[in-house]
Image (tube, rainbow, N blue to C red):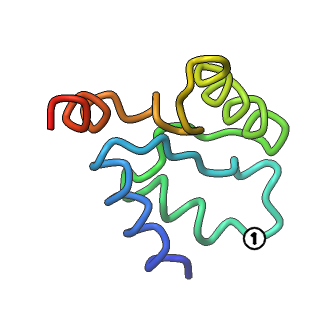
Amino acid sequence: MGRDGAKELRLMRERGALTIAQDEESSVVYGMPGEAIRLGGARCVLAPDAIAAAVRHQLEGCSGLGETPGASMYPARAAGAAAG
């Protein structure tokens, strides 16, 4: 259970995305998060409150910089866009 989503999460991580899976202790159904962790797709494994804090932390880097949310999470892509 959850293998398709876990494979896609791993591909996202391989392409530089911040990927987060919910921890087992707080999960009602651990299928997809567990599979994502097993396949190496999750960079972080966190409880829901910590997930919200991690996303908020990433987005705060964009505040006041004229960037779109998420742009600072992909520095290689942003550098390529500026050069091209």
Kindly state the secondary structure of the residue where label 1 is placed: loop
- The quarter of the displayed image where residue 51 is located: top right
Q: Which image quarter holds the C terminus?
A: top left
Q: Nearer the viewer, residue 34 or 65?
A: 65
Residue highlighted by disc 1: 29
Q: Nearer the viewer, residue 75 or 42?
A: 75
The structure residue drawn at horizontal position 62% and vertical position 71%, both measured from the top left corner, is 31
- Which percent across, then down, holds residue 48? 81, 45
Q: Which image quarter holds the N terminus?
A: bottom right
- Which percent across, then down, holds residue 39? 37, 58
The structure residue drawn at horizontal position 67% and vertical position 21%, both measured from the top left corner, is 63
Looking at the image, residue 76 sits to the left or right of residue 61; the answer is left
Please, is residue 20 above or below residue 72 in the view? below
Query: Please, what is the three-letter code of the amino acid marked with disc 1?
Result: Val
Please, is residue 37 above or below residue 18 in the view? below
Q: Nearer the viewer, residue 57 or 32?
A: 57
